[in-house]
Amino acid sequence: MRLMEKRKNINGIVDDKTQEELIKKKLVKKKHNFHIGDVVNFNAGLSGKGDKMVATNIQYLYNPALDVLINKAKTENNFIGYLKMIDDNIYVKEIDSYLFFPVAPSPWQMIPTEKELNEAVTFSLENTGNKEKVTAKLFNNNYIPEFYTAVKLFKSKTPVDAKVYKVSPHGIYLNIVSDKVQAKIPVTDPNVKIGDAIKVQITYLSPAKIVVEAL
């Protein structure tokens, strides 16, 4: 006769405040973004009301599914998942492991539509050397039209008459393509004011960053 193992679910809190308390107590070294499949240590005890079991001092150990994906990324960095919106941030849920990875943020990326949230996407993993900072890079991204205009200006090395929209001791802030693609240059002229036009050229452009140089 084979006895069936009986499993019991115990709930616990793993928010930022709880993790900060564990760090202060030196129970954990750093914060962890918990995923489905994480193997953890914890203390089990009765709740304050004494009506149920709760988990405290939850400490992350490892995640076998995450290790498998990271190892695969070394030789075949190509995965399938579904886009998800969580607290206005874009994530990809890997189709087999159900692990969530944040999509590397871009200030010019278009927010996925409801239809796109239900369709499969292909992506690669980045920052795999640090399990706490693994992100997803979509193979196909949709950006606002102004970003594509900036790409053309960058590739053609075309100068831009950028309008100043803010001046501070830290820099001069410019509208490069309308007010959708913006950049900053050092303060070289103390007389520059909001509304002035400065001729610049885009010297670096990626989905996450733009660098311009005054001409």
Image: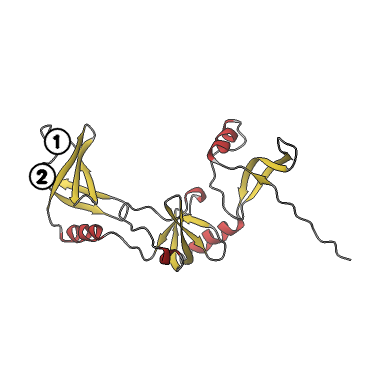
Is 118 placed above or below 48 here?
below
Of residues 214 and 108, which is closer to you in this image? 108
Q: Secondary structure at mark 2?
A: strand
Question: Residue 195: where, in percent of width, then height?
Answer: 12, 41
Left or right position of 193 against 180: left
Mark 2 or mark 1, earlier in chain: 1
Is 18 placed above or below 139 here?
above
Q: Secondary structure at mark 1?
A: loop
Question: Residue 151: where, in percent of width, then height?
Answer: 22, 59
Q: Quadrant of residue 138?
A: bottom left
* Residue that lies at the very extreme toward the right in this rendered image: 1
Question: Residue 107: where, in percent of width, then height?
Answer: 32, 51
What's the distance in space between the residues labelled 2 and 1, CA to CA?
14 Å
Question: Residue 34: where, in percent of width, then height?
Answer: 56, 49
| Neighbours of disc 2 within 10 Å: few (<14), some (14-19), many (20+) | some
Residue marked by disc 1? 188
Q: Residue at x 57, y 52 (%)?
A: 35
Q: Residue at x 13, y 36 (%)?
A: 193
| Neighbours of disc 1 within 10 Å: few (<14), some (14-19), many (20+) | few
Q: Exactly how many numbered labels are in the figure?
A: 2
- Which residue type carries mark 2? Ala
- Which residue type carries mark 1? Thr
Left or right position of 145 against 114: left
Q: Residue at x 17, y 46 (%)?
A: 213
Closer mark to the observer between disc 2 and disc 1? 2
Residue marked by disc 2? 197
* The N terminus: image quadrant: bottom right
Q: Residue at x 41, y 66 (%)?
A: 116
